[in-house]
Amino acid sequence: MSPRKTLATSHRVLAQLRHDPRTLALLFVVPPVLITILKYIFQNSRMFDSLAPMLLGIFPMVMMFLITSIATLRERTNGTLERLMTMPIGKVDFILGYAVAFSAVALLQASVAAGVMLGLLHVSVLGGTVPTLVGAVLSAFLGTSLGLFVSAFAATEFQAVQFMPAFIFPQLLTCGLFVPRGQMARFLQWLADIFPLTYSVDVMKQVTVHATWTGAATRDVLVVVGYAVAALLLGSLTIHRQE
Amino acid sequence: MEAVVSVKNLSIVYKNGLRALEDVSLELPRGKITGFIGPSGAGKTTLIRVLVGRQRIADGSATVLGEPVGSARLRGQFSYMTQNLSVYPDLTVTENLSYFAHMLELYGSASTSAVHEAIQTVDLTPQALQVVSSLSGGQKQRVSLAVALLGDPPLLFLDEPTVGLDPVLREQLWKLFRELARSGKTVIVTSHVMDEADRCDDLVLIRSGKVLAHASPHELCTHTHSKTVEEGFIKLVEQAA
């Protein structure tokens, strides 16, 4: 493993994004716009106050999942990964390069969305801004890791996009965003207990209702990090030097 | 002459049962242009992928620069230009080369000068700050070749480097390959275009996964009593049938 190569890969991924202003605009404009729309859907401000932070735990994961799975699929199909695998770069350098780059983008994305949510829409988050950003970046890290892993199973960009409803939507439906998890059918509760997005959303719930960092939030963070690291490791196993 | 590539009884069978290479044995000379020539689907790319360590070997063995193919010690000792462009279309020419230079462990001034030299060699200095997707097909091909020149490798594997290029550009690239060979580098090129065979020092004619002949263009024409390599290739195919 080489930190210089990891950082060079992150730098390259960020340079690719920099040359794509449309994607940048979508990354930074869509989450605050959706949160603002939600504000006017729920006239009841208590409902909005509880949902908005949870969305901040979901958007980064969904968007990073999509971007990462397509970006790494392109590496596999346009020959760059083929060329890189004959060079002295570790598979971990390659994967961590993506994770670092997209986590940095997520920090910026979450800062913009949190700025709108806390500053303009006056959502009350008792835990404060920094824990909110930590939760959002964690969610992005999870999305990046899962995207890297899942991209190995897609042969085309069309397939990669289809993985979102197949892989992310079940997590979205059962994470407690629409109905408290305790009110769902028992087997769905079991599923929710397995899905990593549940814990990412739980971090945000903890941060919203507690002024201090809680043990439950630490547990949720560890579970999300555990899933993300496992997905990264599995992702590195899907990259083969020899085929 | 010392062999830079050695292949013994190599066979490759894909998972779908397709036999891509069958009992191939070769010794390729150092400091020459060797052409793997044959029609599409002959097994040229599979053979290159074996040599760069990307294709797992079913039977037989292969060494490059004295090391078994796929060895970690070989990484960075040769360059590989794939049939796809294998560069990032959304980065500039310089950004692409800088990234690959870093992957070859060239940093700071070493990276800057290697990138500058490679861009100059492929005659892309005016396009250095342009995004690759905005370049013409031939220019994109040259960006990919420039990546293969980074770090001054002693051995270059170039898979169909001139495919789809106009005759003038093809001529320029072949001049470059000749200069590289003259400076002591070994250049291994694949092509399905028979008239490119005459430009090689050493030819490996491949068809249906089998090596039909391994000789210089002159030896091949003499041996088959042919005027051109293409004519010789056809005679060899007829003899093998």
Image: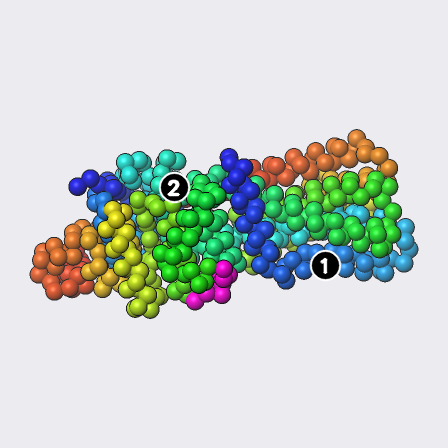
Residue visible at 22% across and 59% down? B199
- Foreground residue, A152 or A215? A215
Task: Give yes or no for residue B132 being in the magenta stretch.
Answer: yes
Place of residue B167 in the rendered image (x, y in percent of width and height, measured from the top left): 30, 68
Q: Which residues are magenta?
A: B129-136
**Mark 2 neighbour class, 10 Å CA radius: few under 14, some 14 to 19, many 20 or more:** many
Q: Nearer the viewer, residue B15 or A53?
A: A53
Q: Which residue is mark 1?
A: A29
Compared across the picture, whether A219 is left or right of B36 comes to right
The circle on residue B127 is: none
Q: Is residue B44 above or below residue B235?
A: above
**What is the residue that sits farthest to the top in this orientation?**
A215
The structure residue drawn at horizontal position 9% and vertical position 56%, both measured from the top left corner, is B223
Could you tell me the amino acid type at mark 1?
Val
Q: Residue at x 12, y 54 (%)?
A: B219
Q: Indicate the chain on which mark 2 is placed.
A: B
Q: Secondary structure at mark 1?
A: helix
Q: Provide the secondary structure element on which disc 2 rests.
A: loop
Colour mapping: rainbow
Mark 1–mark 2 Cα distance, whole angstroms, equals: 42 Å
Describe residue A202's horizontal placement relative to residue B220 as left or right: right
The picture quadrant where one finds residue B217 is bottom left
